[in-house]
């Protein structure tokens, strides 16, 4: 009950008029913007501000689906988004493999705290690593589960240093925060983490930089310098329409359902061609170099240019191949995409793959 009361402020504004939301950023609005972006209707940044572009996209969505054109994302409008329209952030515990509005909000909150994750409403590996990093900095259990403790900490505190590129000149009173030194931490590492210098940390805490930091030492960490205040914003995203054109083009070329292709690409990258996973998967379809070479050599029989068009072509060629191998069975083809063709043949569909498959298929009906 305590956590629900803390999070209640996040729920209310979803039903407020857009004008009321425009002046302040509401994290729930980020989930709405992601859902609208997936539909190709919203082309602005994921910034949690219900400005004119967000309202216009809501109205366009409502007109397309025969809903009352109010510009307000009410429950009826959110239901029409399918899995991208539910549940609201804070309504459930989040774990890897989850998909929906609340995951998009979580990803937005991670990004605005300087933790780079894709914002596509899918709790994938990069999002898991981002949550664990957040939990580590909050001194919480690093289990990657966003439950009551992590939710409360996200809502109530501002625990993380943010990317220094988001700065605006504004005179504010300089304050200090306290950091308790943990095992394995060094002054140079802390200076990088908090976007300051070793000399400034040493001077502020009367330390000799050449000496080892003692575990448990309470360090004063300087706030924003030079009268600058950090402004938390989400990453700007590229236009969706050109990506959907590419996906539809290659879906038609290979005879694959364009809605399935759109949903798969969204789940993989949120239509972000610049995304690179820690494993080295790249682009809109998140393809590994080895997968790219396999498609070139075995499926298309020539080299494919490494750009957005090439990435979509290689990805669609691969899902077309998997659909053919599994006789048009979309569930098996998507499972093979996720866990490997050989693994599906040998072991069947893994439990972890079932959630991915179900989410892609559910999303495909709304794309």
Image (spheres, rainbow, N blue to C red):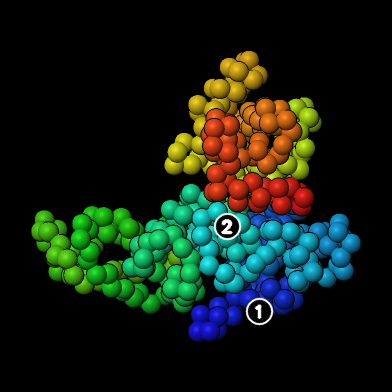
**Which residue is labeled 1 in the image?**
12
Residue at the spot 48% in from the left edge and 69% down from the top edge: 147
Of 1 and 210, nearer the camera is 1
Residue 334 visible in the shown view: yes
**Image location of residue 29, percent across then percent down:** 65, 67
- For this orientation, the residue located farthest to the right is 66
Q: Is residue 338 above or below residue 84?
A: above
Q: Secondary structure at mark 2?
A: loop
Of 308 and 340, nearer the camera is 340
Dot 2 or dot 1: first in sequence order is 1
Residue 248 shows which numbered tag? none
Q: Secondary structure at mark 1?
A: helix
Label 1 packing within 10 angstroms: few (<14), some (14-19), many (20+) = few
Label 2 packing within 10 angstroms: few (<14), some (14-19), many (20+) = some
Tell whether 194 sits left or right of 237: left
Residue 98 shows which numbered tag? 2
Could you give the CA–CA distance between mark 2 and mark 1, rounded to whole angstroms?
A: 23 Å
**Image location of residue 172, percent across then percent down:** 42, 75
Residue at the spot 30% in from the left edge and 68% down from the top edge: 222
């Amino acid at each position: 009950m305590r956590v629900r009361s803390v999070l209640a402020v996040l729920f209310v504004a979803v039903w407020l008029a857009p004008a009321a939301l425009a002046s302040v950023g509401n994290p729930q609005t980020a989930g709405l913007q992601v859902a609208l972006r997936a539909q190709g209707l919203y082309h602005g940044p994921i910034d949690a501000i219900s400005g004119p572009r967000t309202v216009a996209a809501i109205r366009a969505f409502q007109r397309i689906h025969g809903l009352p054109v109010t510009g307000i994302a009410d429950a009826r409008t959110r239901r029409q988004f399918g899995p991208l329209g539910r549940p609201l952030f804070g309504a459930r515990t989040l774990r890897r493999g989850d998909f929906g509005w609340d995951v998009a909000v979580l990803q937005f909150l991670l990004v605005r705290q300087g933790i780079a994750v894709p914002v596509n409403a899918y709790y994938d590996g990069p999002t898991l690593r981002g949550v664990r990093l957040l939990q580590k900095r909050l001194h919480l259990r690093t289990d990657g589960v966003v439950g009551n403790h992590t939710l409360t900490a996200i809502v109530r505190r501002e625990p993380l240093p943010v990317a220094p590129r988001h700065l605006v000149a504004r005179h504010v009173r300089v304050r200090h925060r306290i950091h308790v030194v943990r095992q394995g931490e060094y002054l140079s590492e802390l200076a990088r983490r908090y976007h300051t210098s070793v000399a400034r940390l040493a001077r502020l805490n009367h330390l000799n930089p050449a000496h080892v930091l003692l575990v448990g030492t309470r360090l004063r960490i300087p706030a924003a310098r030079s009268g600058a205040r950090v402004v938390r914003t989400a990453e700007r995203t590229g236009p969706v329409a050109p990506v959907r054109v590419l996906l539809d083009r290659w879906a038609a070329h290979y005879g694959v359902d364009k809605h399935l292709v759109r949903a798969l690409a969204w789940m993989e990258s949120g239509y972000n061609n610049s995304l690179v996973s820690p494993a080295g998967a790249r682009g809109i379809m998140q393809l590994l170099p080895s997968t790219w070479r396999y498609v070139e050599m075995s499926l298309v029989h020539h080299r494919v240019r490494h750009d957005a068009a090439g990435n979509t072509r290689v990805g669609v060629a691969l899902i077309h191949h998997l659909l053919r191998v599994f006789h048009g069975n979309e569930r098996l083809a998507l499972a093979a995409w996720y866990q490997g063709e050989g693994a599906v043949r040998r072991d069947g569909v893994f439990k972890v793959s079932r959630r991915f498959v179900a989410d892609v298929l559910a999303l495909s009906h709304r794309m």
